[in-house]
Image (cartoon, rainbow, N blue to C red):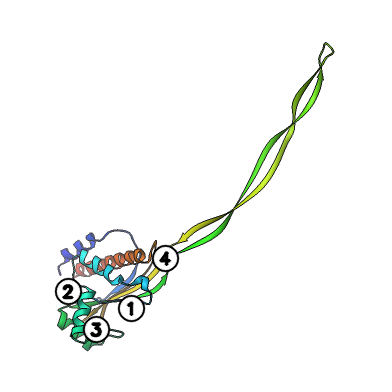
Amino acid sequence: MKKILCLALCALLPLGGCTPKSVISKTYNFDQMNRIGVMGFSNSWPAMQGVENLFAKYLIEAGFKVVERAQLESVLQEHNISVSGYLSPQTTREIGRILGVDVLLIGEVSSYTPARTELTLTTTRRTEARPVYTQDVMKLPDGTYVGYTRNVGTQYSHSTDVRPTEYTINAQVGIIAKLVDVETAEIIWIGSADEFGSSALDAADYIARGLVKSFTKELAKLQEQK
């Protein structure tokens, strides 16, 4: 993979999103990374099913060749290869041989708090001012009397209005992802991020975009140093 290509990959990714933490191997030869196999992410929450597809989307957008989860798992089942839990070097080599991939993207949903609605009471205090009048009688110069109204002050009244107010707290998601070389089972890149979103998948999408962007930037820096 050439340096110019790496720089172009960074430019393809959208700005914004999460601020991930990631580490890339300084000794691995990324020139040999041509195809990435995306594994199903470990996940305990039904709402987070399919988050690995978001990573596949952004990897493809960045220019990588990707074997996505459904195709990968179908082939592995045909060969009776289990990918649950720890992946030994022997298993990763077998996966690489069958699928023709150089690295595997493996991940887990490390935390998830669903969006929720909270109800709080909002208190509004009001003060109203009302003029106070009184009736009076005034004697005119000709000796007659006439009635009139005059202001004698201001009366204040206070009231309190209590109303329920509903607001939404966004979902929060944490994801850890790593790239593993199929020949050695060496972790060549690992990243993690936490993000909020209006839904679980929105938050996961921000994370996937941010982590892939972080990886391409780190990869470009390595290529520049060569």
Quadrant assignment, res 46: bottom left
Viewer-proximal residue among 24 and 97: 97
Within 10 angstroms of label 2, few (less than 14), some, or many (20 or more) residues? Answer: some
Q: CA distance from mark 3 to mark 2?
A: 15 Å
- The kind of residue on which mark 1 rests is Ser
Q: Secondary structure at mark 3?
A: loop
Residue at mark 4 to residue at mark 3: CA–CA distance = 33 Å
The mark nearer the N terminus, 3 or 2, is 2
Q: Please name the residue that numbered disc 1 is placed on.
A: 42
Residue 116, percent from left and from top: 46, 64
- The residue mark sitting in front, 2 or 1, is 1
Q: Position of residue 173 (x, y in %)?
A: 39, 69
Say which of marks 3 and 1 sits in front: 1
**Which residue carries the number 4 mark?**
171
In the picture provided, is 129 more to the left or to the right than 207? Answer: right
Tell me the residue that label 3 is attached to: 185
Q: CA distance from mark 2 to mark 1?
A: 22 Å
Q: Residue furthest right?
A: 143
Earlier in the chain: of badge 4 and badge 2, it is 2
Residue 179: percent from the left, percent from the top? 26, 76
The residue depicted at 23 percent of the width and 78 percent of the height is: 104
